[in-house]
Amino acid sequence: MWQRVPRAEHGRVTENIMGLHMSLLEVLVLLGAVALVVARWFPPAVRPGVTIAAGAVFVLSAIVLSVVGIRWQLLPVLAGAAVALPFALSPLLRRRTGRSAWRARWWLALPGSVACVGLIATGPVAAWAFPVPVFPEPSGRFAVGTRVVQWTDPHRPETFTADPHDRRTVVVQLWYPAQKSPAGAQRAQYLGRTEHEARTVSDALARAVGLPGFLVDGIPRAHTHSVFNAPVADGGGRFPVVLFSPGSGGVRTQNTAWAEELASHGYAVAALDHPYDSAAVVLTDGRTILTKTTSTGDRDKDNKLAVGWTAVRGADLSFVLTQLDRLGRGEIAGPLTGRLDTGRVAVTGHSMGGAAALQAARQDHRFDAVIDLDGYPHGPTSPSLHQPTLALTQAITPATDPHYIPRLTKALKLNTATSYRLTIPGAAHLTFMDGPLYLPPVPSIVGSLGRTESPRVVAATTLAFLDTTLPDKPGDLAGVLSAYGDLSVYRPSNNR
């Protein structure tokens, strides 16, 4: 069974076949290429018809693909077909001109055919390893809208620049419960408001991890399930708020699948770009700010730097909460005016963003709950946390930083509210973001849960925590969480 998923390329919409990670046009090119190679092994009576049909399908599909955009994964397919095409057409041309057709003996032709098929086969393998990400359908009752805002804190200097007049600016993307959009409505571009922004961010992310940009060219081609600036859901209710800080070098959209799932269940999610820390931040005036936070390779120096970067992120989170509170009270005009419940707020983050969430909650008691997605707790562990906290961690292996779990456990035990640490078997550090949707399914990179299960587990555990904690509803949260992994519960009465 396969599902068609819209994918926009240069203003044209193609159909992506889930499971194959290729569009219908790409599949036609693949089938035409294979048929050209194997046509010479068909019986003589049908060989000309197969060759002509295969050549026509291949050439026409390749021409259309060249218009809508050819992915690098199709280059081996085109190369294999290009090698096979002269040998496939030569007997037909010789027969038409009356010349005797020469065909290589089978023991000479077989290695060439096998080599061509092998080359062609690398195409779908590459498309599977580096696909255009297909985002899971949100399971909640709400459709999802999204919009991007940019806010400047007039009271906080920008510490990453030497300009004394420069003030800290953050870019925030909001996902929220929305009215159902008309059929065929344009879905939001992944990684950016426009394809240009998406490619700028994708290239920056690739450079940050040392990958050639073309390897992940499928990421900026992707579209999500949310609709930009969709009308807010009817009903007049107010939505609990979840703030999110990405990992080191990460970007506001890195947990889009998670944000859309939460929004479909009635939450407003606000994810931050941290300028000079995020890989690339595109401002409304068109400027692009690249990261300035780089590792030195010295553990002690990097830890000190991380403490400072975490503090900046924590201040960003508090500032954004202030802006969201103003939006919720109607002091800032916008579609969500009066629809945000800033009396029920969780602060979350992945990796360094998780550390920032912990720090922000220590300093700002407006945050009612904390979620740390596999984040090492940089910075001081005092003052103590006073909010219910959920820490999700990857599977612990001999390669895990030996300081990580003890330091995280200390922070959770000092909490005056109940804390939960859930270690998820099969999870890796990148399991807790969108990475499993578009990176090669190598367990050491994205874990072994799979492209479907990874986002489901992260969303299910965090939703269970939020649904119980923000409305402070009674329930067996520990029982729900323990179904997903190894759970430790730290209650205030047991922490002293």
Image: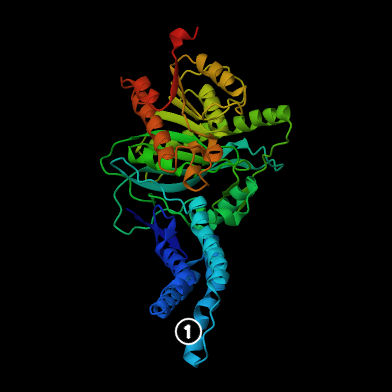
Of 493 and 458, nearer the camera is 458
Q: What amino acid type should be assigned to the residue bearing mark 1?
A: Leu
Secondary structure found at label 1: helix
Q: Residue at x 39, y 38 (%)?
A: 456
The picture places residue 264, in percent across and down from the top left corner, at 34, 41
Q: Residue at x 29, y 57 (%)?
A: 183
Considering depth in this image, is 45 or 495 the residue closer to the camera? 45
- Left or right: residue 207 versus residue 490 is right
| 455 horizontally vs 80: left or right | left
Residue sitting at x 48%, y 88%: 95
Rendering quarter of residue 455: top left
Q: Position of residue 393 (x, y in %)?
A: 50, 28
Residue identified by numbered label 1: 92
469 and 36: which is toward the camera: 36
Task: Tell me the crowding category of disc 1: few under 14, some 14 to 19, or many 20 or more residues within 10 angstroms, Cα based.
Answer: some
Image position, residue 71 (x, y; %): 52, 62
Above or below — where is 189 with respect to 100?
above
Please tell me whether residue 399 is drawn above or below residue 218 in the rendered image. above
Identify which residue is drawn at 47% across, 18% down: 386
Q: Can I make out residue 178 in this image?
A: yes
Which residue of the protein is positioned furthest toward the left in this rendering?
A: 235
- 84 to 3, vertically: above or below: below
Which color mode does the image show? rainbow
Q: Position of residue 447 (x, y in %)?
A: 50, 37
